Amino acid sequence: MAAELSEARAALAGVSNEPGAPKPDPIVKGSNITRTFGGLKAVDVEHIEIQRGVITALIGPNGAGKTTLFNLLTGFDEPNEGDWSFNGKSLAKVPAYKVARRGMVRTFQLTKVLSKLTVIENMRLGATGQRGERFFSAAFKSLWSSQEDANTTRADELLARFKLDAKREDFAGSLSGGQRKLLEMARALMVDPELIMLDEPMAGVNPALKQSLLGHVKSLRDEGRTVLFVEHDMDMVRDISDWVIVMAQGQIVAEGTPKSVMADQRVIDAYLGAHHDTDITEIDVADLEAEAEAELVAEAEENKS
């Protein structure tokens, strides 16, 4: 597994830093994806590829379209146009639950745990293909009890891994914000996904749990899974990501390794504005004074009339 991870990372070394650059082994590919809300074009992505087996960060200022793109890729929203695929199979018009069954799952910025169910019940719900949920077999426990036992065993293993085993019988609504993030991540693993997408996993998490979450995200990659996450914490992005994609105003404006992206002028412009670094000494002070004087004269003339 370590050799595969090293190979996946090494393959990125030859990838261009231009938006939509092709990857050696993409697990997700999308083209001409747009989504408008009224007169606002929230997403306008010409091309995007996500490399298999690495951690990719999706960053950008607020309102850049990152979460909307997540919703489109995972079937929680429909684009106005565009097509995208997972493992070479189109996901256009595929509902969210079927996307998850194919091995592409996500978490949410605002956690979606079921507060009035216990932690272990939340975990069991994450498993797919449960025979006990079918109408005709539900009445016959012998048909599904062994499967539920296996799901419970897997759930307990994941709870122990995420240090939530002590909360097993607690209601999910009693967990802290950080613990809910851990529960959502653990529940997502019940389907044994190939790609896990995390929407701002560090949002609202206290410093004590943040390091734990970072370790868990890295462990997902170390197991051979692909991780795509949205995040505003640049320290986290530099620490764990192998590749970074930058969005601004619905478009991909840059991508590359964390080091190259942080030094990219397009990224600096996207976050701080294209002219954030203009030195006031470079501005013609005489022109400013003349402009101000002209405004005063115009105002005086208006008052006379």
Image (cartoon, helix red, strand yellow):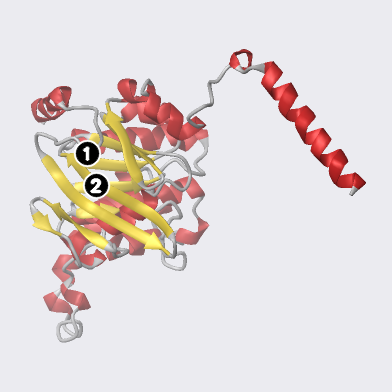
**Can residue 165 be seen from the camera position used here?**
no
- Quarter location, residue 146: bottom left
- Quarter location, residue 168: bottom left
Task: Give 195 or 115, whichever is nearer the viewer.
Answer: 195
Percent x, y of residue 268: 44, 27
Mark 1: few, some, or many residues within 10 Å (few <14, many ≥20)? many
**Earlier-in-chain disc, 2 versus 1:** 1
Q: In the rendered structure, find residue 20 and report the number of the disc placed on it.
A: 1
Q: Quadrant of the N terminus?
A: top left
Mark 2: few, some, or many residues within 10 Å (few <14, many ≥20)? some
Q: In the rendered structure, find residue 46 and report the number of the disc placed on it.
A: 2
Residue type, numbered disc 2: Glu
Work out whether 70 lies above or below 232.
below
Q: In the rendered structure, find residue 269 and report the number of the disc placed on it.
A: none
Percent x, y of residue 297: 82, 34
Q: Which residue is found at the position 24% from the left and 61% from the top?
A: 81
Label 1's element? Answer: loop
- In the current view of this chain or complex, which residue is farthest to the right? 304
Percent x, y of residue 80: 29, 64
**Can residue 253 be seen from the camera position used here?**
yes
Work out whether 121 lies above or below 266.
below
Percent x, y of residue 259: 33, 20
Work out whether 160 lies above or below 57.
below
Task: Give 203 or 276, whichever is nearer the viewer.
Answer: 276
Q: Which residue is found at the position 41% from the left and 48% from the top?
A: 181
| Cα distance between the residues tagged 2 and 1 | 7 Å
Work out whether 268 lies above or below 220.
above
- Tag 2 and tag 1, C-beta contact below 8 Å: yes
Label 2's element? Answer: strand
Q: Which residue is found at the position 86% from the left and 41% from the top?
A: 301
Q: Which residue is found at the position 19% from the left and 27% from the top?
A: 16
